[in-house]
Each structure stands twice: as C-alpha cells, then as structure tokens.
Image (tube, rainbow, N blue to C red):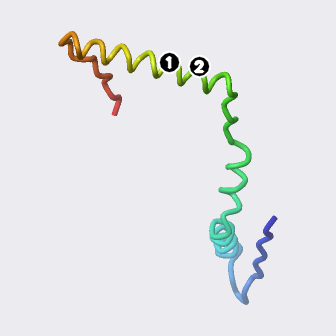
Amino acid sequence: MINVKVKSNKGESSISLLRRFSKRVQGARILAKAKKIRFREREESPFVKKKNRLRNIEKRKRVEKMIKMGIPPKKKKRRF
C-alpha cells in the first residue's frame, strides 16, 4: 500500500495542508484502488455463462425467423 506524507510549510493553514494531502491521495489513486476492491463484481459461474449464451442463441434464432417471415424485429427503447 502506498503511503502519502505531507509536511506543513511555514505559515500554511491547516485547510491548505488538507487540500494538498487530498490532491496527493487522488494523484496516488489510493481511493480508486480501495473502491475497486470494495465494489468488485463477482465473476459469472460457468453455468450462468452457458445459460446466457443459450439465451442469446435462441433470441438470434427468433429474430432470424421473424426476418424470414418479413416481420421487423422489435427494438428496445433506450432510457437515455
């Protein structure tokens, strides 16, 4: 783990010292690394991966069948 040290300069206020410390912490990417560890997502199990792949194959077959029949496939509306 990376430690960040900041010494106060002569006549420097505690607020500016804290600001310099915060900038160093951001520069060292300490908080980003901690959040990455804290909020990491689990890897999908092989069963779930297989299930998702099969679902995509079925969906693709359905769309191809609709196209052959001349029916345009429905498009999902995006929220943004």
Label 1 SS = helix
x, y percent for residue 1: 81, 64
- The residue at the far bottom in this view is 10
Label 2 SS = helix
- Residue ID at (41%, 17%): 59
From the viewer's side, name the closer residue of 27 and 68: 68
Question: Residue 41, which numbered label?
Answer: none
In three-dimensional space, the C-alpha distance between marks 2 and 1, rounded to whole angstroms, equals 6 Å
x, y percent for residue 34: 73, 53
- Residue ID at (33%, 34%): 80
Residue 80 vs 52, above or below: the answer is below
Question: Residue 55, which numbered label?
Answer: 1
Residue 6 vs 42, above or below: the answer is below
Q: Amino acid at mark 1?
A: Arg
Q: Are marks 2 and 1 in contact (CB under 8 Å)?
A: yes
State left or right for residue 61 relative to residue 66.
Answer: right
Q: Which residue is mark 2?
A: 51
- Residue ID at (68%, 78%): 13
x, y percent for residue 46: 68, 27
* Residue count near mark 2 (Cα–Cα under 10 Å), binned few <14, some 14–19, many ≥20: few
Residue 29 vs 9, above or below: the answer is above
Q: Quadrant of residue 76?
A: top left
State left or right for residue 37 relative to residue 61.
Answer: right
x, y percent for residue 21: 70, 71
From the viewer's side, name the closer residue of 27 and 71: 71
Residue 49 vs 28, above or below: the answer is above
Q: Quadrant of residue 75?
A: top left
- The residue at the far left in this view is 70
